[in-house]
Image (spheres, helix red, strand yellow):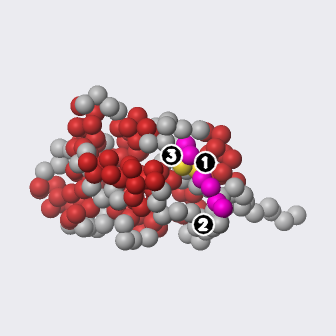
Amino acid sequence: MARMQRVRCAWASGDPLNVEHHDTEWGVPSRDRRHLFELLTLEGAQAGLSWLTILRKRAGYKAAFANFEPDAVAEFAPADVDRLLADPGIVRQRAKIEATIANARAILLLEAGGVSFVDYVWSFVGGRPIEGSFEDGSLPAETGVSRAMSKDLKRRGFAFVGPTTCYSFMQSAGLVNDHVPTCFRHAECAALA
């Protein structure tokens, strides 16, 4: 008897890392501070590169950036930047490295003001995931919400958080469910909202 093939979003094909990321993480609503910082970092690192490149370097990023603990990364000094520029396990671009450190510090400043990073991120969608729309079958690169998020993040000292990066972050962290309706993960992620 032939095995039934699962229907997935079109981008989640080919490389097993893409398939695994799609099937287990992408679009799952995350309310974990460390995980949200990780996804924001990885989406910023992806700018100008393929997502598969970043997935292949994810373990290197975890090792290089203290498992994405904002408190630890905020303490990184210029010597750490130099060390990271020599680390083949990550994208060795100074601006992206410095942005990760700046973003950890911005998280701490936000929280020092009495707002949790998790609550702040989710405030852009009213605390619940947005259900994606597919009138023409394609996903937007950015939305009004991602533009608002980008503008406010930048105002608060975050870097590498343009509207497109913010929308990718929203998709990855489950702030928006952009699994196509025929994808087996669409209903699963919607049920987690």
Which segment did they paint magenta? 129-135
The secondary structure type at the circle numbered 3 is loop
Q: Is residue 25 left or right of residue 161?
A: right
Please say whether residue 159 is one of the residues in the magenta stretch.
no
Let me know if residue 75 appears in the view: yes
Mark 2 vs mark 3, CA separation in Å: 18 Å
Mark 1 vs mark 3, CA separation in Å: 9 Å
Q: Which residue is mark 2?
A: 138
Please say whether residue 131 is one of the residues in the magenta stretch.
yes
The secondary structure type at the circle numbered 2 is loop
Amino acid under disc 1: Glu
Residue at 37% x, 42% y is: 34
Q: Given the current orientation, which residue lies at the most extreme left position? A: 78
Q: Residues within 10 Å of mark 1 (few under 14, many from 20)?
A: some
Q: Residues within 10 Å of mark 3 (few under 14, many from 20)?
A: many
Q: Which residue is mark 1?
A: 131
Amino acid under disc 2: Ser
Please report contact status of discs 2 and 3: CB closer than 8 Å, yes or no. no
Please report contact status of discs 1 and 3: CB closer than 8 Å, yes or no. no
Percent coordinates x, y for residue 22 in the rendering: 57, 57
Q: Earlier in the sequence, mark 1 or mark 3?
A: 1
Percent coordinates x, y for residue 133 in the rendering: 62, 55
Quadrant placement of the N terminus: bottom right
